[in-house]
Image (spheres, rainbow, N blue to C red):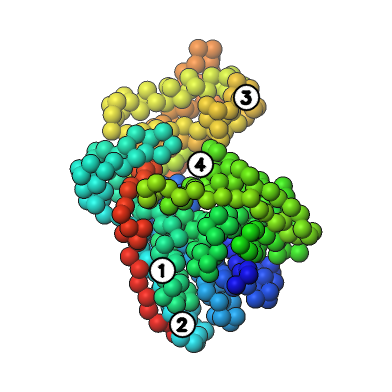
Amino acid sequence: MSSIRIICPNGHLGFAPLKTESFRLAVETRPDFIAADSGSDDIGPVPLGNDSCASPRAWQEHDLEEMLLAARRIGVPMLIGSAGDTGSNSRVDMYVQIIRDIAAKHGLAPFKLGWFYSEVDRELVRAKIRGGSPIRGLDAREDLIEAELDATSRVVAMAGVHPFVKLLEEGCDVIIGGRSSDSAIFAACALHKGFPEAQSYYLGKVLECASFCAEPYGAKETVMGEITPEAVSVTAMAPWQRCTVASVAGHAMYERSNPFHEYVAGGLLDMTDCRYEQVSDKTTRVTGMAFVPAEDFRVKLEGSGKVGERFVGMAGIRDPYTIANVDAVIDWARRQTEERFGPDGWELHYSVFGRNGVMGEMEPLKDKPGHELCVVVQGVAPTREMAEEVCMTGTRQMFYARLPDVKGTAGGVSFVLDEVMQASPAYRWTLNHTMAVSDPLELFPTHTAVVG
């Protein structure tokens, strides 16, 4: 086969619904595969920790229905990775059931459904540690210790191409994956058809976020990638978008400390010598990528652990003197909370929007706040009742803060809402590590069934 074409309709399936016009235009070109990623750790540690979705089920069902009906109509495989935002076992099961329900709803002819799981038993990780196989930290983290493992609620491993390729080799028409490397979902299709690793992984990298590799910016539009043994070409399918040298190269370089290196399970995609060429108004062609196999096979682990229950409060500040002394106001509220609850067993987090609420200490203009501020307060504690009171104290006491030059009795703080609002429980990332395995499929059990 001299080339294959893959379309990707959504860079995070279900996070917002795919745009049907560009998707249906892409389907009419009769691609060889339809694929999409459905997960990200950009959504934070909460969905993984409490085993939930960050996206409404209706949006996920919408995208899955559009993709499944199109794939079955033109008779090509459909692949989904990181089901349900996190790729946990329950999210995979949810997607498998959605596929079954859509097939029944539309009376689809029988097809082969495959799926794999990605959750990892904590005791397996513990055995690796005790057996002398370190769980190595990423992004300057220390190697994993058992205390941090004990603080973890749920662990998923990030699959490479291997379970996808296995299920394709078994003849699956639809594949639902657990937590997966974004690029692996697409690279697996190309590797299954015999294309080189370098071009296959670059194909995955450029397609993973759909129309993020096109301009002008517009999310959830479909793009199409074509691979040959020498090159990858990517084409925008929305009539108003183009895949340009700038947009494709820019997407290839984002979300990593080294813009030219993309690590996957089993190796490294090196984009240092990539060459980009505008071959038509809507298409850019890329050559020069390389793949460097890893010396040992390591799989990334993601883990999330519960910190406590959480409530959120909001306060607005317009008074210039209070704005100038906002840190003293926050310190006052924190001290009042400590008087009530003692120094330990609770947390208060303040985000000051209008000063540095987005970038924190990285904000270059934090000494030049705006003329009004919004302070978002998060109170975290072991129980719902305590978290509510911690948050309420930490929010309301800002109103009563005593500043040196305040003469009146009225506070310098207003409240967006009189009450504080219950939020999801607070979780934190506990694992961002890699673990050595002897078999690329060791952590990813696969299953198949005939549906329809």
Please name the residue shown 22% across and 51% down the image: 123
Image position of 434 with respect to 211: above or below: above
Point out the image quarter for the N terminus. Answer: bottom right
Residue 323 falls in image quadrant: top right
Residue 166 is labelled as 1
Query: Can residue 203 be seen?
Result: yes
Q: Residue furthest right?
A: 281
Q: CA distance from mark 4 to mark 2?
A: 53 Å
Residue 417 is labelled as 4
Along the line of sight, which residue is nearer the eye, 50 or 12? 12
Along the line of sight, which residue is nearer the eye, 17 or 160? 160
Q: Which amino acid does the dot numbered 3 rest on?
A: Leu
Pointer 3 with pointer 1, Cβ within 8 A: no
Residue 285 is labelled as none
N-terminal of the two: label 1 or label 4? Answer: 1
N-terminal of the two: label 4 or label 3? Answer: 3
Q: Which amino acid does the dot numbered 1 rest on?
A: Lys
In the rendering, at what x and y percent does residue 67 appear? Answer: 56, 72
Please name the residue shown 44% across and 41% down the image: 312
User: Given this view, does label 4 or label 2 mark the residue nearer the observer?
Assistant: 2
Q: CA distance from mark 4 to mark 3?
A: 28 Å
